Image (cartoon, rainbow, N blue to C red):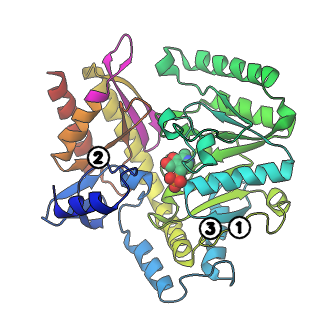
């Protein structure tokens, strides 16, 4: 164990789990470096954050320039980077989204989105989906059902949160159509037995479930949610914290669907590693939120906002490359799935790809040991890869957008070798 890991264990709360013992001293693009001169390709992206690769020069430069100007406002002064970040977000978010507020973390953005929905509708209920992840603060954890561990020991949670099933066709051994139909029937039952639609302020959904196992919502499912919300005056809130900023090879997952949300929560990749999150909605909705009924000290920090503007500028030209990488990755994983019985399913959107590992393909039995083997194998060969899903058996494959096709081929080749070794 390195000296730092030992010191870490003496003074840092162990409740925050770290994936590796790597002591990073420098990070650039795909690569992170330790004190001994070892390096790893970071296919975890700091948990889906550094979508432009670590320390993107334009982002670092924008932050550095702002550091020399103004570091903090705390909602006392106006400053240009806040306005510029909001203007840029308006350019890239769905057309229904016109005005923005800023915060520091994904959980805060989600909570703000729900507070907005409650305040402007005057309703209390929130409908969420099983397997969803929306954060770990006391409010947001009430919406999170990707893993019971996040809620264990923290009850009672917020009341009037209703949990409906989200389509998991592979896990249920169903076609996509069957899974959607099952979910909509269950949703209908919830609305008849547990809460009337007129009590719902928001339907909160990740267009691609992230932590829950990388399940993209089928189009017909999101369309049905949109229709439900329109019929009953409920606000459709997309949690794009993980799916945003190029992760699905478009600005947002919403761009893949013929459905626009009323409210969007964003975070993670928004400033490529500087702490920032945001929520957006139509001018009509945001202007109806009474002044002073929500607030923040650090949210929309001037340096983080400068970084966000640079992220949006740097990402635009990379999106076509991201689409090419996505095609290549899905193509290569399909090849792997044909030759490895351990791969039960490959799914996702853009560069948000889940590869589900199973011990019995017929029964689709989750195989977390297979993931641990792949994780170790890759780590020993200069690659960091993390998991998702409640059983820890889904490879969460999230290359940064600056990955070259050669690096992508190399990474998938390592996973191929790992699975061959595991299966032998
Ligand atoms: C979809 C989604 N929403 C919300 C969050 C919470 O973000 P944070 O950890 O920044 O609070 C996450 C984090 O993984 C997420 O993936």
Q: Name the residue under label 2.
A: 408
128 left or right of 213 in image: right
For residue 186, above or below residue 287 = above
On the image, the x and y values in percent for residue 222 come to 67, 33
Mark nearer the viewer, 3 or 1: 1
Q: How many angstroms separate mark 1 from mark 2 (CA)?
A: 42 Å
Residue at image coords 67%, 41%? 204
Label 1: which secondary element: loop
Q: Name the residue under label 3.
A: 88
Q: Give the range drawn in magenta.
A: 347-369
On the image, the x and y values in percent for residue 41 come to 25, 53
On the image, the x and y values in percent for residue 411 come to 25, 44
Q: Residues within 10 Å of mark 2 (few under 14, many from 20)?
A: some
The dominant secondary structure in magenta is: strand
Mark nearer the viewer, 1 or 2: 1
For residue 176, above or below residue 404 = above
Give the camera-side residue of 152 and 131: 152
Q: Is residue 354 magenta?
A: yes
Q: Image quadrant for the N terminus?
A: bottom left
């Amino acid at each position: 164990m390195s000296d730092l890991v030992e010191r870490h264990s003496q003074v840092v709360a162990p409740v925050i789990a770290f994936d590796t013992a790597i002591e990073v001293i420098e990070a650039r693009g795909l690569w992170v470096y330790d004190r001994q001169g070892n390096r790893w390709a970071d296919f975890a992206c700091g948990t889906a954050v550094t979508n432009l690769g670590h320390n993107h020069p334009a982002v670092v430069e924008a932050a550095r320039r702002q550091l020399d100007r103004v570091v903090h406002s705390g909602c006392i002064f106006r400053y240009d980077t806040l306005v510029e970040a909001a203007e840029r977000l308006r350019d890239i978010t769905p057309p229904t989204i016109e005005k923005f507020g800023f915060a520091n973390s994904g959980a805060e953005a989600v909570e703000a989105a729900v507070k907005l929905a409650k305040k402007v509708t005057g309703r209390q209920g929130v409908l969420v989906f099983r397997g969803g992840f929306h954060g770990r603060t006391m409010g947001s954890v009430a919406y999170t059902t990707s893993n019971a561990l996040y809620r264990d020991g923290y009850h009672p949670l917020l009341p009037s949160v209703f949990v409906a099933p989200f389509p998991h066709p592979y896990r249920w051994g169903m076609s996509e159509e069957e899974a959607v139909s099952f979910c909509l029937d269950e949703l209908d039952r919830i609305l008849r037995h547990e809460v009337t639609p007129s009590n719902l302020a928001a339907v909160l959904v990740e267009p691609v479930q992230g932590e829950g196992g990388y399940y993209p919502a089928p189009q017909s499912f999101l369309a049905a949610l949109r229709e439900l919300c329109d019929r009953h005056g409920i606000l459709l809130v997309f949690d794009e914290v993980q799916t945003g900023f190029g992760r699905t090879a478009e600005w947002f997952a919403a761009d893949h669907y013929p459905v626009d949300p009323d409210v969007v929560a964003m975070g993670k990749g928004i400033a490529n590693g500087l702490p920032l999150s945001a929520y957006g909605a139509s001018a009509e909705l945001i202007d109806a939120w009474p002044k002073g009924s929500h607030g923040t000290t650090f949210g929309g920090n001037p340096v983080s906002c400068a970084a966000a503007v640079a992220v949006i500028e740097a990402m635009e030209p990379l999106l076509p490359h991201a689409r090419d990488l996505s095609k290549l990755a899905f193509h290569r994983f399909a090849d792997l799935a044909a030759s490895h019985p351990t791969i039960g399913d490959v799914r996702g959107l853009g560069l948000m790809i889940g590869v589900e590992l199973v011990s019995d393909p017929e029964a689709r039995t989750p195989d977390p040991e297979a993931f641990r083997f792949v994780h170790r194998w890759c780590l020993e060969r200069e690659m960091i890869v993390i998991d998702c899903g409640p059983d820890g058996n889904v490879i969460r494959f999230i290359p940064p957008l600056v990955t070259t096709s050669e690096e992508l081929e190399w990474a998938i080749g390592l996973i191929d070798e790992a699975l061959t070794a595991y299966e032998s």
